[in-house]
Image: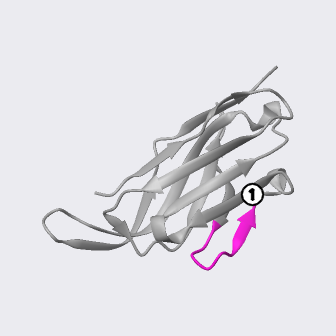
Amino acid sequence: QGHLVESGGGLVQPGGSLNLSCAASETIFSVASMAWYRQAPGTQRKLVASITSGGHTIYADFVKGRFTISRDNARNTVFLQMNNLQPEDTAVFYCFADGAYRTSSGRYYYNQSFWGQGTQVIVAS
């Protein structure tokens, strides 16, 4: 099965920036939407931002003006540039994609959802 690999999390001071990346494995194709979610301890996972293959974006109100989502369709990679980070942004960030994948035996599966393993973002002084 296909998988997503995230990178770019870490510890940053308030007001700082981080850039998250998420790459889909080569077995994933025809990716429609890609998105970032986040989950703080004791809370539900929430949508941060999403982007379609055509570049249409949606942002949660709590990140508008601070975060920017973008993607490289050729590489099925999505990015999240996060600026002016605040302690309340501390969470595990998860990458999401929907599309299709092919197995090593040549079978194809469509309308699949994929999640990354999560990358920790900590904003603290």
Pick whichever, 82 or 47, lies toward us.
82
Residue 61 visible from this viewpoint = yes
Picture coordinates of residue 46 (x, y %)?
66, 50
Q: Quadrant of residue 106?
A: bottom left
Q: In which quarter of the image is residue 41?
A: top right
Q: Residue at x 60, y 43 (%)?
A: 93
Q: Name the residue under label 1.
A: 68
Picture coordinates of residue 71 (x, y %)?
59, 64
Q: Residue at x 42, y 76 (%)?
A: 30
Q: Is residue 52 magenta?
A: yes
Q: Is residue 87 magenta?
A: no
Q: In which quarter of the image is residue 65?
A: bottom right
Going by the image, does 60 lie left or right of 94? right
- Numbered range of the magenta stretch: 51-59
* Quadrant housing the N terminus: bottom left
Pick whichever, 100 or 79, lies toward us.
79
* Quadrant housing the C terminus: top right
Going by the image, does 15 lie left or right of 32? right
Task: Name above or below for residue 8 compared with residue 116.
Answer: above
